Image: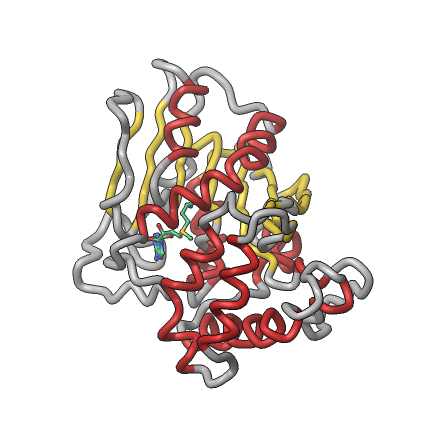
Amino acid sequence: MGDTATMESGYVFDTSWEREHGRLLALEEIYDSQSRHRLTELGVADGWHCLEVGCGAGSIARWLARQVGASGHVLATDVDTRFANAHGLSNLEIRTHDLRSDDLPDASFDLVHARAVIEHLPDRDEALRRLAAATRPGGWVVVEDFDFDGWAAVDDFDLDGPMDPAAAGYFPPGYTGPAERLGRALRATFGAADADPGTSRRLPEALTDAGLTEVGAQVHAPVRTGGDAAFLPLTLRSLRPRLLATGEVTDWDIEDVISLTKSFGTTYLPNFMVIAWGRKPL
Ligand SMILES: C[S@@+](CC[C@H](N)C(=O)[O-])C[C@H]1O[C@@H](n2cnc3c(N)ncnc32)[C@H](O)[C@@H]1O
């Protein structure tokens, strides 16, 4: 494992933001259930050795540690481990690690999992190759990334097409304009940080290119009701200066979408999550 202090993280979110921990907890609240479901389906069991990359606040790492028991082990890494907490689990090790540059043990893990991490890295194919290299033959790599087109993808599913929230009707009248502009601003913000919001749709192909077999994928489309979710408002507030700097969106647009997510009685879809997996050949 190398020294991360010498390298700028390049990560689009400001991890020193006062509410970043809350944002990560809100992400876990929405997306953990389907991650756990998929990992269970793949057979995570007693004695497995797991790597949780970019573990954030660590809920999946802790869940894995409970699944693999005392004979198993979980290594949870992140470029910034301030929010990760092992909650006293003796088979869970948390380590500061930059996936772009720091070494990983070779062919060591039964399971390697990374959620909402790969899309942030400038060299995504190389990152996937590293995850595959760290997996033992017969082990699984599971990668999840957000689908930024998800809220537009029902009527008009076009892999390269523009985002059109109005077509899918996921936003009530009056919100489609702000949502459209926000979509453009998010893409520009990620692009400026060398991140790629289109990563998720290419994951099955990318996992195959990384040498994995038995590749599969599913989409998790969580339905939220206004007033119950903090993730989208906190994400928009965290990114607000960068979103405004793109010139694509106004402060009013951002506040409009935030107010939608906070109004009781509305239903909306935050970003979909693509969950993709592949197995290292024996
Ligand atoms: C959107 S958060 C997701 C956190 C967690 N995986 C989850 O889904 O709850 C992305 C995480 O990736 C981490 N990260 C960003 N760049 C990284 C890198 N180069 N190496 C390792 N972790 C990184 C961030 O610090 C952050 O914790």
> What residue is rendered at 73% in x and 69% in y?
166
> What residue is rendered at 68% in x and 43% in y?
216
Q: In the rendered view of the protein, which quadrant contains the C terminus?
A: top right
Residue 168: image x %, image y %? 76, 62
Is 16 located above or below residue 25 in the figure?
Answer: below
Residue 65: image x %, image y %? 38, 24
Within the image, what quadrant is residue 209 found in? bottom right
Within the image, what quadrant is residue 7 found in? bottom left
**Front-most of 125 and 26?**
26
**Front-most of 146 and 243?**
243
**Front-most of 260 and 192?**
260
Residue 10: image x %, image y %? 32, 67
Question: In the rendered view, does 136 fall on the left or right side of 101?
Answer: right
Is 38 located above or below residue 268 in the figure?
Answer: above
Q: How are the residues colored?
A: secondary structure
Is 217 located above or below residue 15 in the figure?
Answer: above
> What residue is rendered at 57% in x and 48% in y?
264
Give the farthest residue toward the bottom.
247
Is 268 located above or below residue 178 in the figure?
Answer: above
